[in-house]
Image (spheres, rainbow, N blue to C red):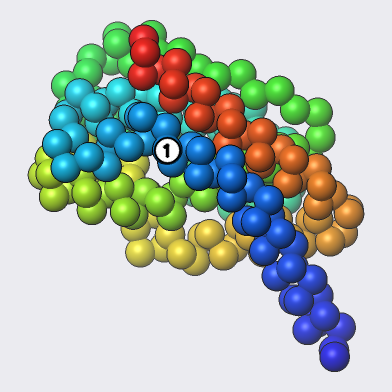
Amino acid sequence: MSEATALDTEQELFFKRLRQETAESHQKLEDNPLSKAILSPSVSVKDYQTYLTALFGLTIACEDQVFPVISHVITDLPGRYKSRLIIDDLLATGLSATEIDALPVYRFEFSTVAEALGIMYVLEGSTLGGKILYRHIHEVLGLVPENGASYFWGYGAQTGNLWKSFISSLTQFVDEYEERDGVIDSAKKTFTIIDNWLGQTGRS
């Protein structure tokens, strides 16, 4: 086996372990009432706004707090800012700029680059599920990327390529610094954080 093939296999094994060890907390997040409401056949604009406002507090927190710490690992971060898309969608569906300015923002707690990457893994992974959510929102509410559904549209046709690029950079980092456990533990914690945050937002 060549050195390059061995490295590829090791990266694949890490990614498989990462998905396996976060599967339970990921499923719990998908079972969150707010997560289910957004995929309901009767989802309303209000449900959609509630979900987006929760995601805004997490997304802008990640951009402000996490991005600066991992910019040397994930070098294409400038193209991954998405809080502006949420703002555009909320404005397009009827929220005012004043209401958006008053939205709560989460405060992530982490101390290492590995922990920051675990947070980013979960937030960036949501772009894949966004494709499913976009189709549903488009069918039920009639929203399009140019008017109200830009966040779930995400990177559009580039979503798959950007996800692969992120995972490649992440796995290279854990190979170099032996930080597998730090990334995995942080990702599991982040799924739980988002689940709790959605629960709080849904009740407010």
Q: Can you tell which quarter of the image residue 146 is in?
A: top left
Is 29 or 118 nearer to us in this picture?
29
Above or below, comparing residue 153 to residue 45 in the picture:
below
- Left or right: where 79 falls relative to 176: left
120 horizontally vs 95: left or right: right
On screen, residue 159 versus residue 64, left or right, reads left
In percent of the image, x 35 and y 29: which residue is there? 34
Residue 176 placement (x, y as % from top left): 87, 59
* Quadrant location, the N terminus: bottom right
Element marked by disc 1: loop
Q: Is residue 178 left or right of residue 74?
A: right
Q: Residue at x 40, y 17 (%)?
A: 201
The percent position of residue 117, horizontal first and vertical second, equals: 69, 43
Q: Is residue 149 above or below residue 172?
A: above
Q: Judge whether residue 171 can be spotted in this image.
A: yes
Report x, y in % for residue 12.
70, 70
| Residue located at (13% from left, 50% from top) | 139
**Can the viewer see residue 78?**
no
* Residue 204, horizontal then vertical, whole percent: 36, 10
Who's the residue at 74% across and 40% down the image?
185
Amino acid carrying label 1: it is: Asp
Question: To which residue does mark 1 refer?
Answer: 31
